[in-house]
Image: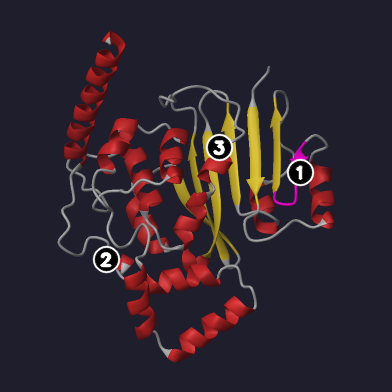
Amino acid sequence: MSYYQYYEFRAMDRLLSDTDRDALRKVSSRAEITSTGFATHYHYGDFKGDEKEFLTRWFDMHLYLAAGGTRRLMIRLPARFAKRKTVERIVGCCEFAEFIDIGDDCLLDMFVYDDGADYDEWDDGPGWLDALAPLRAELLSGDLRLPYLLWLAAADREMLRDDAQEPLAGVGPLTEGLEAFGRYFGIDPNLVRAAGETTAGPDCGEISPETALAALKEMPEDEKTELLHRFFMCDLLAHRDLQGRVRPAATSDIAAGSAKFRTLSELRTRAAAIREERRVARERAEAE
C-alpha cells in the first residue's frame, strides 16, 4: 500500500564533511544530500536510518511529515540552553512533546499522530523546515514562545480545562517561525492570533540595545573575558550564551510580575470573535 512519508534533517552549527555525506549516502541512495542537509521521501517502504542517531551524529533539526496528518519536529539543543525545567512545566500537559537526552545535548521532540487536525491543505513537505528553522535560534536565546504554542496545541486538542491559565502573558509578537509552527501543527489560527495579541514579556522576543548594555555593564569581568575569548575562537554558540545571560527576566518564575495571564476560556472567546471578524471581512470583500 502506498503511504507518503517525507524526512528532512538540517545541520545548523556545522558543515557536513565528505566523509559525513558518504555515510549518509549509504543510508539512502535517493536522498538529496548537501553540506547542511538531508531530505528524502517514500511512497513505499520506510526510512532506513535512525532519527535519533542522525541528530546525535550530524544534525540539529529534523522534520517528518506523512499522509494522514502525522507531523514531527525535533530540535537538538545543548542541555545548558534548553531551560528544560521551565519548558517541561509549560508543556507538562502536552502528550506530544518530550525531551530526549543525548550526551551533553538534548532533543525537544514534538509530534502529532494522525489526529485529524485541521490543516489548511496537504503538501508534500519541502519548504517546511526552512520556515521552522528560526525556532531553534529563538530557543537557544531563551525565548519561551515555542513552548507556549505547544501548550496552545494541547488546548486546541481539548487536553486542558477552560480555567487553565496561559503559561506566559501572551505569545506576541509572533515571528514567522512561530506562525509556521502553528500552521505545521494544525493549531487553530484564530487561537494563535488571540494568543499573539498580547506580548509574552521579557523572557521572549528581541532584547533591546539598552537592556543589553545595562546587563553587560553588570556582568563580572571574568565572564566577559570568557565570552570574548569564545567569540575570538569562532564558537558558534557564544552569541546564544551571551543572549541567555543578558535576558533580564528569570525564566524560573514565568508567572512573576504584574502581567495579566488569561484563561483558556478567555482565549477561546477572543478566538471566536476573531473568527467572526474574519468571516465578516471575507463576505464584505466578496460582495465588493
Q: Residues within 10 Å of mark 2 (few under 14, many from 20)?
A: few
Residue shown at the point (56%, 68%) measured from the top left = 237
Q: Which residues are magenta?
A: 31-36
In the rendered image, the vertical position of residue 165 relative to residue 124, given as above or below:
below
Q: Is residue 157 visible?
A: no
Query: Picture coordinates of residue 146 (x, y %)?
Result: 40, 49
Residue shown at the point (31%, 11%) measured from the top left = 286
For label 2, the residue is 253
SS state under label 1: strand
For label 3, the residue is 128
> Residues under labels 2 and 1: Cα distance?
43 Å
Residue shown at the point (80%, 34%) measured from the top left = 30
The disc labelled 1 sits on which kind of residue? Ile
| 258 within the magenta span | no
The disc labelled 2 sits on which kind of residue? Asp
For label 1, the residue is 33
Q: Work out which quarter of the rendered image holds the C terminus and state it.
A: top left
Camera-side residue: 187 or 286? 286
Select label 2 or label 1 by which is in front.
1
Query: Picture coordinates of residue 187 (x, y %)?
Result: 37, 33
Q: Work out which quarter of the rendered image holds the N terminus and state it.
A: top right
Q: Is residue 110 left or right of residue 42?
A: left
Marks 2 and 3, the one that precedes in the sequence: 3
Marks 2 and 1, the one that precedes in the sequence: 1
